[in-house]
Image: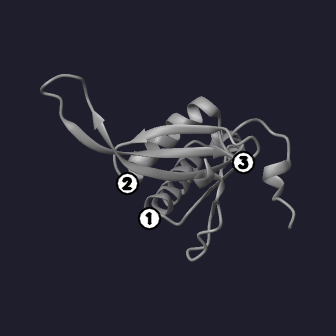
Amino acid sequence: MGNLPTARVTPTRPFYNSGLDYAGPITLKTWKGRAARSYKGYLSIFVCLATSAVHIEVVTDYTKEAFIAAYKRFSGRRGICATLQSDCGTNFVGADAELKRLFQQSSQELGSLVALLATDGTEWKFNPPSAPHFGRSGRQQ
């Protein structure tokens, strides 16, 4: 059996190195009662690679805007990730491009915050498109 990746065995704070996947669809209701409407929603599942702790965020749809909102809630509660591993879903690839673009804009507009934001950069690693056996930590939970 091969060695585990260093992100899995290095002692760090929880969710410093995380895996990410979506689950669903699930049915969401805005309130209880007779006139309650049902909506389709999804779960964004963040898994700590070191401790296997799980953080679940509700996402309204598969758009990159919905994912970025869920990621902001996650990072506000758990802290910023050094690495984030996910599959090559279009929402994740789009969110990666959008976060990089926002980082570039903020770096250009706010020169005094460049050093601070540079230390907060999250490296996003995508699993190979035809390798479903990669990134299994999120699916094993």
Question: Looking at the image, do the residues carrying marks 2 and 3 touch, with CB atoms under 8 Å apart?
Answer: no
Instruction: Name the residue that disc number 2 marks.
Output: 62
Residue at (64% x, 59% y) in the render:
136
The answer to whether residue 58 is left or right of residue 120 is left
Q: Residues within 10 Å of mark 2 (few under 14, many from 20)?
A: some
Amino acid tagged 1: Thr
The quadrant the N terminus occupies is bottom right
Tell me the distance, in whole angstroms, between the alpha carbons under discs 3 and 1: 23 Å
Instruction: Name the residue that disc number 3 marks.
Output: 49
Residue 31: x %, y % from top left:
24, 24
Quick one: 135 or 64, which is closer to the camera? 135
Amino acid tagged 2: Tyr
Residue 26: x %, y % from top left:
35, 44
Compare marks 2 and 3 and give the one earlier in the sequence. 3
Residue at (13% x, 25% y) in the render:
34
Quick one: 105 or 82, which is closer to the camera? 82
The answer to whether residue 52 is left or right of residue 76 is right
Compare marks 1 and 2 and give the one earlier in the sequence. 2
Question: Looking at the image, do the residues carrying marks 1 and 2 touch, with CB atoms under 8 Å apart?
Answer: yes
